[in-house]
Image: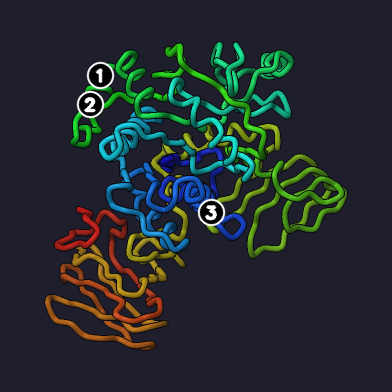
C-alpha cells in the first residue's frame, strides 16, 4: 500500500498562526507538526519509500526539511510540487499517475496533512484494502455534534466492509446538520483508499479530459488542468463509492474552535496559558506574553508578533472572511510571519522602518543563498554566531563572530555557511525600497528565478 499526503492547503481559518507561506500543517503545535505526524503515520502504512507528497511549489522545501527532521529522505520523484493549486482531484490524480507508472495495480491511501488521526485508524484502513479493488473507498466519522463545518455522507447498502454511499452532502446549516446526525449520516473525513485500476476506470468515465492528461508517462501540463475537488469531480458521480466508518480519534483542526476542543481545559473550560478571573470557555495563544482575562467568556485570543485575533468561539469559521479583507488590500500579513522560511534557512524581521529594515538571518550548515544583487538597497551584515563565507563581486572572504561587511547596492553578493553549526547574521537594510522583489538572481541551487 502506498500513501499520498496532500500538503497544499493554506489554512486561512487559523490565521494569524497559519499564513500562505507557512500554513497550519507545518506549524509546530506540540513537538511535531501536523505534517510530520501524518508523515510518520504514512511510514507505518507504506514504509519510507512508499510515500508521495503533493504540495504547492512554495512549500516544497518545508516538506523536504520537515521530512529530514524526522530522519527520512523524500525521493525527488515522490515530491510533487504544484505550480498552482488545482484542488484535490488533479493533486490525487497526479500522484496516482506516478504510482501507476511504477506499479500498474497498486493501492494508495490519501491523507490530508492537517488532520489529527488516532493510531486505531491504520488497522481499519488496512482492513478496507480488499474493498478498494472494486470501489472508491472513503472513510466516514460518526458525528459527535451537528457540525456545520464538515461535509456529510449518507451510508446505504451494507457491504462486506462498510456501506455503499447513497449521497454526499455539502456543509449544512445547523438545523440541517441536526437532521443529518439523527439520520445516521457520517462526517466526510477526506481520507480515501484508491486502487489504480478502479480510480482510473472511474476517472475515464466521469472526467475524460483529466484522464487523458494523466494517461501518459510524462507529467501533465498542470496549469491546463481544471480545478476541481475529488468529491465534485468524481465521488458524487460514481456508482462505485463505498464508505467505511472510521472508529478512531479524528479532527481536521480547521478552526480555532477545533483546536479548543482538542486541547486540555481547566475547571472553567479555559485553554491556554493565562490568568483567568471569572472567565470561562476561552482559548488563549500568546507565547511569551502575560495575558489576563476578567469576566469574559467564549473568546478566541491569538497573538503573534505582528497580528492579533480576537473573536467569539462560535464565529471561528468567519476568520477566512477576515483574511480575505486583508488580501483585498494586498496586506502581506496573510502571506508571511515575521519569521520567513527559505530553503537555505530562515530570516526574521526584527524592525521595519520606512527607509531601513533589520533582520536576523539564519543559514543552515552547508547551505548558501543565491548569487544576487539589489538595485534599491544596501546591506550591512554582522555575524553573531558561526562563520560566514561572503562573496562580493567575485571575491570571497570569511567573517567570524563579531565581524562585519557592507554590501553596496548593485553589488553581486552571496552568503554561505561553511560550518557545522547554524550561521546567524544581523542584516541592516538601507534604501528607499526594501521589498523582497528587489532581488536579481544569477545563480541559485534551489531553482528560483
Q: CA distance from mark 1 to mark 2?
A: 6 Å
Q: CA distance from mark 2 to mark 3?
A: 34 Å
Who is closer to the viewer here, 410 or 31?
Answer: 31
Secondary structure found at label 2: helix
Q: Which residue, given by chain and number where applicable, does mark 1 sit on?
A: 209
Residue 239 shows in this picture: yes
Residue at image coords 59%, 60%: 31
Residue 25 shows in this picture: no
The image position of residue 341, as x and y in percent, is 40, 59
Relative to 384, does residue 361 appear above or below in the rendering? Answer: above
Q: Which residue, given by chain and number where applicable, does mark 3 sit on?
A: 33
Relative to 23, does residue 91 appear above or below in the rendering? Answer: above
The image position of residue 237, as x and y in percent, is 43, 12
Discs 1, 2 touching: Cβ within 8 Å: yes
Disc 3 crowd rating (10 Å Cα; few below 14, some 14-19, many 20+) is: some
Disc 2 crowd rating (10 Å Cα; few below 14, some 14-19, many 20+) is: some
Q: Quadrant of the N terminus?
A: top left
Residue at image coords 36%, 18%: 202
Secondary structure found at label 3: loop
Q: Which residue, given by chain and number where applicable, does mark 2 sit on?
A: 213
Q: CA distance from mark 3 to mark 1?
A: 36 Å
Q: How is the image coloured?
A: rainbow
Disc 1 crowd rating (10 Å Cα; few below 14, some 14-19, many 20+) is: few
Foreground disc of the pair 2, 3 = 2
Earlier in the chain: of badge 2 and badge 3, it is 3
Secondary structure found at label 1: helix
The image position of residue 248, as x and y in percent, is 66, 38
Question: Would residue 208 be found to the left or right of residue 23 on screen?
Answer: left
Question: Would residue 306 be found to the left or right of residue 82 on screen?
Answer: right
The image position of residue 236, as x and y in percent, is 46, 15
Who is closer to the viewer here, 152 or 434?
Answer: 152
Amino acid at each position: 500500500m502506498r500513501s499520498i499526503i496532500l500538503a497544499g492547503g493554506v489554512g486561512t481559518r487559523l490565521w494569524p498562526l497559519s499564513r500562505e507561506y507557512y500554513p497550519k500543517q507545518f506549524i509546530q503545535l506540540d513537538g511535531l507538526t501536523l505534517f510530520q505526524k501524518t508523515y510518520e503515520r504514512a511510514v507505518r502504512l507504506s514504509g519510507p519509500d512508499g510515500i508521495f507528497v503533493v504540495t504547492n511549489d512554495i512549500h516544497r522545501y518545508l516538506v523536504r526539511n520537515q521530512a529530514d527532521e524526522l530522519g527520512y529522505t523524500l525521493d525527488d520523484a515522490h515530491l510533487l510540487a504544484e505550480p498552482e493549486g488545482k484542488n484535490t482531484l488533479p493533486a490525487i490524480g497526479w500522484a496516482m499517475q506516478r504510482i501507476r507508472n511504477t506499479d500498474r495495480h497498486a493501492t494508495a491511501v490519501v491523507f490530508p496533512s492537517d488532520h489529527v488521526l488516532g493510531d486505531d485508524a491504520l488497522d481499519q484502513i488496512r482492513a478496507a484494502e480488499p474493498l478498494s479493488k472494486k470501489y472508491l473507498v472513503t472513510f466516514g466519522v460518526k458525528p459527535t455534534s451537528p457540525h456545520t463545518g464538515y461535509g456529510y455522507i449518507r451510508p446505504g447498502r451494507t457491504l462486506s466492509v462498510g456501506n455503499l454511499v447513497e449521497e454526499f452532502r455539502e456543509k449544512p446549516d445547523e438545523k440541517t446538520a441536526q437532521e443529518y446526525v439523527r439520520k445516521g449520516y457520517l462526517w466526510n473525513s477526506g481520507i480515501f483508499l484508491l486502487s489504480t485500476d478502479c480510480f482510473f476506470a472511474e476517472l475515464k468515465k466521469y472526467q475524460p479530459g483529466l484522464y487523458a492528461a494523466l494517461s501518459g508517462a510524462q507529467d501533465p501540463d498542470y496549469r491546463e488542468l481544471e480545478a476541481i475537488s475529488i468529491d465534485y469531480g468524481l465521488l458524487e458521480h460514481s456508482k462505485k463509492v463505498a464508505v467505511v466508518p472510521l472508529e478512531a480519534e479524528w479532527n481536521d483542526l480547521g478552526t480555532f474552535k477545533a483546536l479548543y476542543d482538542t486541547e486540555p481545559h481547566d475547571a472553567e473550560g479555559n485553554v491556554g496559558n493565562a490568568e483567568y478571573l471569572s472567565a470561562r470557555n476561552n482559548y488563549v495563544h500568546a507565547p511569551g506574553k502575560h495575558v489576563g482575562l476578567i469576566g469574559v467568556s467564549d473568546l478566541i485570543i491569538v497573538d503573534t508578533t505582528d497580528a492579533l485575533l480576537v473573536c467569539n468561539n462560535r464565529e471561528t469559521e468567519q476568520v477566512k472572511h477576515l483574511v480575505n479583507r486583508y488580501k483585498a488590500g494586498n496586506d502581506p500579513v496573510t502571506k508571511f510571519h515575521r519569521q520567513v522560511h527559505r530553503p537555505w534557512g530562515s530570516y526574521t524581521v526584527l524592525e521595519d522602518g520606512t527607509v531601513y529594515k533589520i533582520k536576523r538571518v539564519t543559514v543552515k550548515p552547508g547551505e548558501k543563498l543565491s548569487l544576487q544583487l539589489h538595485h534599491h538597497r544596501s546591506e550591512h551584515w554582522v555575524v553573531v554566531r558561526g562563520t560566514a563565507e561572503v562573496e562580493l563581486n567575485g571575491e570571497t572572504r570569511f567573517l567570524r563572530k563579531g565581524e562585519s561587511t557592507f554590501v553596496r547596492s548593485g553589488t553581486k553578493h552571496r552568503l554561505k555557511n561553511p560550518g557545522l553549526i547554524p550561521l546567524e547574521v544581523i542584516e541592516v537594510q538601507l534604501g528607499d525600497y526594501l521589498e523582497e522583489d528587489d532581488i536579481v538572481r544569477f545563480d541559485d541551487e534551489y531553482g528560483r528565478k
